[in-house]
Amino acid sequence: MSGVAVDRASVDLDVLADLEEQRRFLLQSLRDLDHELEAGDIDENDYRTLRDDYTARAATVLRAIEQGRAQLEVARETKRRSPRFVALVVAGVVGVAILAGVLVAAASGQRLPGQTVSGSVATATSDRLAQAQQKFVQGDAVGALKLYDQVLKDDPRNAQALTFRGWILELAGLHDQALTSLDKAIASDSTFAMAHFFKAMVLFQGKHEPAAAIPEFQAFLATNPPPDAVTTAQTYLSQAQAAAAAQPKP
């Protein structure tokens, strides 16, 4: 059988069908090996070598099938998402745009927000942050979250990891946990723009507290973000101000 196709950007039904066929072939091959060993038609060394190879290939295929099914489910869910989810996606795009500027600064030798470690740990931190950003952009929120958690294990006050970890938790609907992570990011580095923007979005879109979101949007705008981000943030700020004004007074 040919190698497993696991690097496709999107997995369609034809690819999944091919993966299922590979799975059936490999599982049947494992069963045939057991029969051949019982019948004495293969020696134990060859049996172990072939069994290890088939088992490893089968595991890879099963992971690819699970990934493909998950991607198809995400595609189906996206079609049914609410306007709020669309707003959150837009917010994530803005976050990546701002983060790009942070990474450019890091590449020129400047300290990353919240970064307090040095040497090989600092290098590992930077590498993990870059990998996490890539996974986040590609839609692998779970993979990004794991990397951010690894960063925070070595550098618990890393503002970038705390911020984007908080945003991923918000995308999962965990508003309170998201706010906790974002508050830690702001406490670590109050100048990190995206912590304010994401906190504002959690308060406005997640917690339905527009009045509380207003100062966070304003704090974000005070950091002089790129023009596209300014336009998006100002739009949300206006919406939050209108929503706050419409709420009944206590």
Image (cartoon, grey):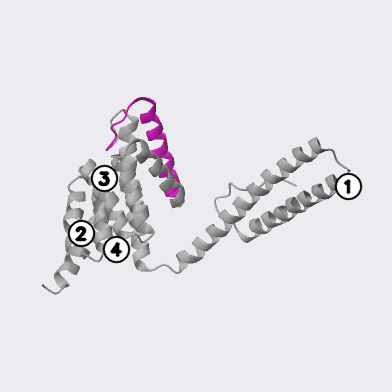
- The kind of residue tagged 2 is Ala
Q: CA distance from mark 3 to mark 4?
A: 18 Å
Between 108 and 117, the residue placed more toward the observer is 117
Q: Position of residue 42 (x, y in %)?
A: 86, 41
Q: CA distance from mark 1 to mark 4?
A: 63 Å
Q: Main secondary structure of the magenta part?
A: helix
Residue 95 visible in this rendered orientation of the protein: yes
Three-letter amino acid code at disc 4? Gly
**Which residue is denoted by mark 2 in the rendering?**
213
- Read off the residue under disc 1: 39
**Label ID, residue 185:** 3
Report the residue at 67% width, 54% height from top: 19
Residue on which disc 4 sits: 206
Q: Nearer the viewer, mark 3 or mark 2?
A: 3
Q: Position of residue 65 (x, y in %)?
A: 61, 55
Q: Earlier in the sequence, mark 2 or mark 1?
A: 1
Q: Nearer the N terminus, badge 3 or badge 1? A: 1
Marks 2 and 1 in Cβ contact (< 8 Å)? no
On whether residue 205 falls in the magenta region, the answer is no
SS of the residue at dot 2? helix
SS at mark 1? Answer: loop
Residue located at (22% from left, 46% from top): 186
Real-space CA distance between mark 3 and mark 2, rounded to the nearest whole angstrom: 16 Å
Q: Position of residue 160 (x, y in %)?
A: 31, 42
Q: CA distance from mark 2 to mark 1?
A: 72 Å
Residue 119 in magenta stretch: yes
Whether residue 225 is visible, yes or no, is no
- Kind of residue at disc 3: Ala
Looking at the rendering, the stretch of residues picked out in magenta corresponds to 113-138
Disc 3, disc 2: CB below 8 Å?
no
